[in-house]
Each structure stands twice: as C-alpha cells, then as structure tokens.
Image: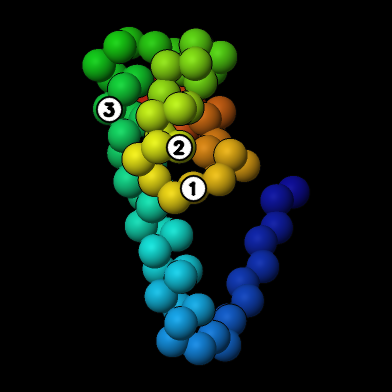
C-alpha cells in the first residue's frame, strides 16, 4: 500500500524563491526530456540518458540526482 505525507514548510521569502526556482527548473527539464523522447522515439532508459543528460545539466540548475529519467520515460509513453 502506498502512503503519502504532506508537510507544510514555513520558509522565508528567500527560501521560497529558491524552491520556486528549483520547481521551475525541474519542470523545464521534464518538458525538454519529453520533447527529446518524442522527437527521437527513444523509449530505452539508458539510451535516453545518453541522449539528454548532459544537455539537461547544461540548460538547468538541476543536480545529477534531480534528473529522474526512469520516471519521465514511463510518463512519456502514455
């Protein structure tokens, strides 16, 4: 059984800005990866990683652990 938890963060405006920037960078990365999947018809996770990883790292502020290609790949198929 899956469970989820919701926690309300009490942050200062600087932290809210950083979190918002991070969310926007993640959204941009998701959109760029999905476009690459569709344009290249690439459904293999390893091949997709090789195709987009370095460009996503250059175009966004995301760290290596934030680029979840496996999750994005399964969403792009549907």
> First in sequence: mark 3 or mark 2?
3
Question: On residue 35, which mark appears?
Answer: 3
Q: Nearer the viewer, residue 75 or 45?
A: 45
Q: Residue at x 47, y 69 (%)?
A: 19
| Residue 75 visible at all | no
> Marks 3 and 2, how far apart in space?
16 Å
Pinpoint residue 38: horizontal percent, then vertical percent. Answer: 28, 19
| Marks 1/2: CA–CA distance | 6 Å
Above-or-below relation of 77 to 31:
above
Q: Is residue 14 left or right of residue 68?
A: left
Q: Is residue 35 left or right of residue 54?
A: left
| Depicted 67 relative to depicted 21: above or below | above
Measured in 3D between alpha carbons, the distance from the residue under mark 3 to the one under mark 1, in whole angstroms, is 18 Å
The disc at residue 11 is none
Return the residue at label 1: 62
Residue 51, by quadrant, is top left
């Amino acid at each position: 059984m899956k469970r989820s938890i919701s926690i309300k963060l009490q942050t200062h405006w600087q932290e809210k800005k950083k979190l918002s920037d991070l969310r926007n960078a993640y959204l941009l990365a998701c959109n760029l990866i999905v476009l690459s999947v569709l344009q290249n018809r690439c459904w293999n996770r390893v091949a997709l990683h090789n195709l987009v990883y370095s460009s996503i790292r250059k175009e966004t502020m995301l760290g290596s652990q934030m680029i979840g290609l496996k999750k994005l790949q399964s969403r792009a198929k549907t």
